[in-house]
Image (tube, rainbow, N blue to C red):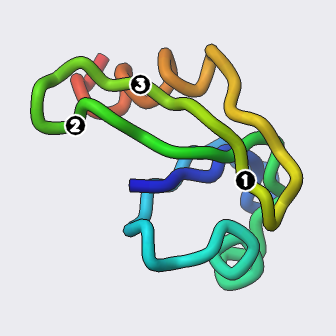
Amino acid sequence: MKYIAGKIESLDTLIMFPDYHDHREMSQILRMKATSAGFVSGLGSGDICCYGRSVSLELESKLEDTEKLQRIIRGY
């Protein structure tokens, strides 16, 4: 999976999507001002981690993205 973190209008959000989509494409479709982007691992095991970078957006993943995604998925 891939992800983008950033703002849609004034809302901070993180969106996950399948690998076959491009980071830039998703950012444009969602009209999102991306602040970080990369890949997601560990969804099946529960050991969720955001890592890497988006070449198309020229953005790195951030440590806080992993923390934010864990809170979203675990519901706290």
Residue drawn at the location 34% of the way across and 36% of the way down = 41
Is residue 36 toward the left or the right of residue 33 in the image? left
The location of residue 17, given as percent across then percent down, is 42, 64
Residue under circle 3?
A: 49
**In front of the other: 19 or 32:** 19
Q: Please give the name of the residue rendered at 12% of the width and 37% of the height, measured from the top-left corner.
A: 44
Mark 3 lies on a secondary structure that is: strand
| Residue located 22% across and 23% down the image | 74
Vertical order, 24 against 73 (above or below): below
The residue shown at (51%, 45%) is 39
Earlier sequence position, callout 2 versus callout 1 = 2
Examine the rendered structure and indicate whether residue 6 appears above or below residue 43: below
Going by the numbered disc 1, the residue's amino acid type is Ser
Q: Which mark is residue 43?
A: 2
Nearest the viewer among 76 and 26 is 26
Picture quadrant where residue 76 is located: top left
Q: Position of residue 42 (x, y in %)?
A: 25, 30
Task: Residue under label 1, please give it.
Answer: 54
> What is the spatial separation of the Cα atoms under label 2 and label 1, in whole angstroms?
19 Å
Image quarter of the N terminus:
bottom left
Mark earlier in primary sequence (3, 2) = 2
Asked if disc 2 and disc 1 are in contact, CB closer than 8 Å, the reply is no
- Secondary element at tag 1: strand
Q: Is residue 57 left or right of residue 5?
A: right
Q: Position of residue 5 (x, y in %)?
A: 66, 45
Residue type pointed to by label 3: Cys
